[in-house]
Image (spheres, rainbow, N blue to C red):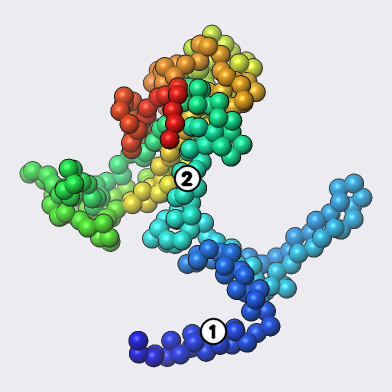
């Protein structure tokens, strides 16, 4: 590789770093970030006090760190931003979901007998985007439409290309001027609130199914869930979640006999329309769970 001014500057900087007395600590920080492409630089201090006596037990400050900063991984789940962190949390997602189904990480293995749903909650369309689909091992046309309309900005709303996996256009709108960027940003910002409303509505439906007042539901069962938020190619959040019915004491206790997998499924499907989140959509399916579907099980293993 030819030596450029930028390369020479980087090499000089590395040599200086190697000769510094704090190199070992700097190298330790870099290792702890796990190969993060864009580590976050923290500055500040932390004081630990004894609550009983008020005595200072320990003080940490980043002033003693190399360059006066503490480097920590960005923890993004977007591979385009940081492949190392995205891979780390992709593995964590599997372990988290698996523990909710068969136990582990503090969850007893008796949860395999508890009514459980695996769900994926996705956002609505904010406009057609370039996508890659396969059928029978063959890549399908992106967004092929017969007699495709022309948008107000003069673009034909169709794409017949068969995109490769690394095509940078994947997730990009067919027409950027038509795409509802405001709606997608607001959806991401309100996603936690939408999830809360979804969970609250399921609890109300479960209480009704058991003939209970909502305030008494927690004395009979617990609605437990483990959820992971991920970004789609188009940059919009969707949720993967395991939703499980436990006893009032948590996963160590079974739920009441009336709280079955069918009851849990119906709690979603029959809850009042006005209580449904305006954006997430879920479809029931007797097949294996996939995007936008929910499947139920009362005895499941991975």
Mark 2 element type: helix
Quadrant of the image containing the N terminus? bottom left
Instruction: Answer left or right for 53 relative to 288.
Output: right
User: Which mark is drawn over residue 201?
Assistant: none
**Vertical side of 118 occupied by 125: above or below:** below
Q: Nearer the viewer, residue 133 or 279?
A: 133
Q: Residues within 10 Å of mark 2 (few under 14, many from 20)?
A: some
Q: Residue at x 37, y 51 (%)?
A: 235
Instruction: Answer left or right for 215 relative to 166.
Output: right
Q: Nearer the viewer, residue 205 or 272?
A: 205
Residue 90 % position (x, y):
45, 50
Q: Residue at x 50, y 43 (%)?
A: 95
Quadrant of the image containing the C terminus? top left
Q: Which residue is mark 2?
A: 93
Q: Residue at x 50, y 26 (%)?
A: 112
Corner quadrant of residue 4: bottom left
**Vertical side of 18 occupied by 126: above or below:** above
Q: Nearer the viewer, residue 3 or 214?
A: 3
């Amino acid at each position: 590789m030819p030596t450029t001014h930028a390369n020479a500057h980087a090499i000089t900087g590395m040599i200086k770093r190697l000769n510094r007395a704090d190199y070992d600590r700097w190298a330790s920080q870099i290792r702890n970030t796990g190969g993060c492409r864009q580590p976050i630089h923290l500055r500040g201090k932390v004081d630990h006090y004894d609550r009983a006596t008020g005595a200072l037990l320990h003080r940490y400050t980043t002033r003693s760190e190399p360059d006066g900063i503490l480097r920590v991984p960005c923890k993004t789940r977007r591979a385009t931003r940081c492949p190392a962190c995205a891979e780390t949390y992709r593995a964590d997602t599997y372990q988290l979901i698996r523990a909710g189904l068969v136990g582990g990480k503090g969850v007893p293995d008796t949860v395999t007998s508890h009514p459980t749903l695996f769900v994926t909650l996705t956002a609505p369309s904010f406009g057609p985007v370039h996508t890659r689909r396969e059928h029978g091992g063959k890549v399908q046309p992106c967004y092929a439409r017969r007699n495709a309309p022309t948008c107000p900005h003069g673009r034909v709303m169709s794409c017949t290309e068969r995109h490769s996996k690394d095509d940078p256009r994947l997730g990009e709108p067919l027409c950027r001027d038509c795409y509802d960027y405001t709606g997608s940003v607001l959806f991401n910002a309100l996603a936690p609130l939408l999830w809360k409303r979804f969970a609250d509505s399921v609890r109300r439906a479960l209480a009704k199914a058991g003939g209970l007042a909502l305030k008494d539901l927690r004395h009979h069962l617990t609605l437990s869930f483990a959820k992971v938020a991920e970004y789609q190619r188009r940059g919009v959040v969707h949720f993967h979640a395991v939703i499980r019915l436990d006893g009032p004491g948590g996963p160590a206790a079974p739920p009441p006999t009336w709280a079955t997998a069918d009851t849990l499924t119906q709690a979603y499907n029959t809850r009042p329309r006005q209580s449904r989140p305006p954006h997430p959509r879920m479809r029931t399916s007797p097949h294996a769970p996939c995007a936008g579907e929910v499947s139920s099980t009362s005895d499941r293993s991975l």
